[in-house]
Image: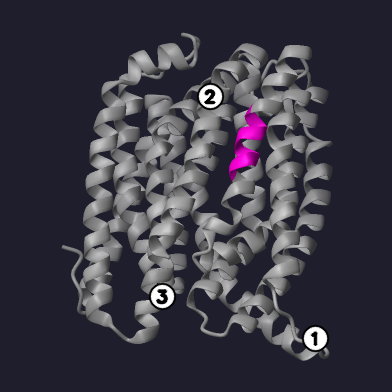
Amino acid sequence: MSLSNTASNLLIRGSSIGAQLALVPIAITTLGPDTYGLWMVATAVAAIATAFDLGTLNAAFNIAARSSNRRAADLCAFAAARRAAGIVAALLLLLTAVVMTIDVSSILNTRQPVGAARLLVLLVCTASLLTLPFAVFNQLSLGRMQASRIAPILILANVGGFIAAWIASQFSASPLLFVACALLPALLAQVHVAMRTLAYDVRLPRRSLRAPLVRARRRIRSQGSPFFVAQIATLGSFHIDNLIIATMLSSAQAAEYSLANRYFSIISILISVYLSTAWPVYAGLARAGDSSALRESFKRNLSFSIAVAVVLAGLLFTVRQPFFEAWTRGTVAPGDDLMLVLGIFSIITAALGNISALFNAIGRLRLQALVTALMLLPNVLLSVLMVREFGVTGTVAASAICASTMLVIYSWHWTRTGYSLR
């Protein structure tokens, strides 16, 4: 099952990477660097908004991965989806009120008219937020290592988004239509997966739901809180950086940063495929009390992930110039310093991803929440200071420094508790 789950995850993430990379030259030509940069900044705003799901998605995944009681996990997913729906409604109302009252164009340093900029930000945020309640059931399948059940529809959605956006670019120059066509298939796929999972896989009690649903809500709230703190804090490593670049430099330079980051995100996406299987495996070993096997599995996965990250980072850095020349048709060319720092940062995050998967599986959520929260303010302050001195590269360097500090803290903690990361 582990091999099948990893292969399915690889196909899902691979199709996502392929579609995103293939869409860039079309988007750059259709939208231009400034509007494309605004799209990426709007995506960062959407990511920050979705992080306010109060940890429901990660809690649902963690419960599915760690729970031996299938029906209890199903009920928790149902409770998480209901909670996410309420959060989405509140966030959409708040975002709409804020966006419609501020001068988005001036704040984000874009040449787009304020009305068009507002609509684009709201479109991207709405599409992202609406997926949250449905994505809970996606997490339920992934936590149970049943990615093969949802892989076909998600792969079709990734390819469908690219095709729909390409068709839109042939018949209209509207940025809103282009972005809507790129985002809509993913939303429809999440809805389809959720409805199918509810119909065939989720088993709810036949009697009154009140008492078990109250218990499920408490469990989601308890496990979701640390995840919420951690995911809010980790936004500083990319999404807040994107906003800092847009507000202090320009949307066009935010596009440069976003494209370079997307280029190196190939590494983190591929590593996450591996870790999405490792997390439930770690949980199973922890549940069985096999600390020796857990320790050896973690060391093996950590070594493998770092080795893969080093090789891929070196390869991506080597081929950066011809790739960007062909990929963006010469319109965007990130500097060597930015690419080098991003390569180093991707290796650090590969190590952090492994530690995070392990700590999640064995229930050390509060430690992660505390460490990431402590690093958020230094990350933002360093990004603001360093972007003034070093431009776009400064934000990545600030994130790399803070990520390295987190790695040291986690290593020290793990050693103190009787284990070694070496």
Q: Residue at x 80, y 30 (%)?
A: 119
Rendered image quadrant of residue 266: top left
Q: Tell me, for residue 209, which label it has, or none.
A: 1
Residue 384 horizontal side relative to residue 116, left or right? left
Span of residues in magenta: 155-162
Residue 419 horizontal side relative to residue 227, left or right? left
x, y (%) of residue 309?
28, 43
- Are there few (<14), some (14-19), or many (20+) residues within 10 Å of tag 3? many
x, y (%) of residue 205?
75, 86
Q: Which residue is mark 2?
A: 22
Q: Is residue 163 above or below residue 218?
A: above
Q: Which residue is mark 3?
A: 283
- Are there few (<14), some (14-19), or many (20+) residues within 10 Å of tag 2? some
> Which residue is at the far left?
422
Q: Tell me, for residue 399, which label it has, or none.
A: none
Which quadrant, please, contains the N terminus? bottom left
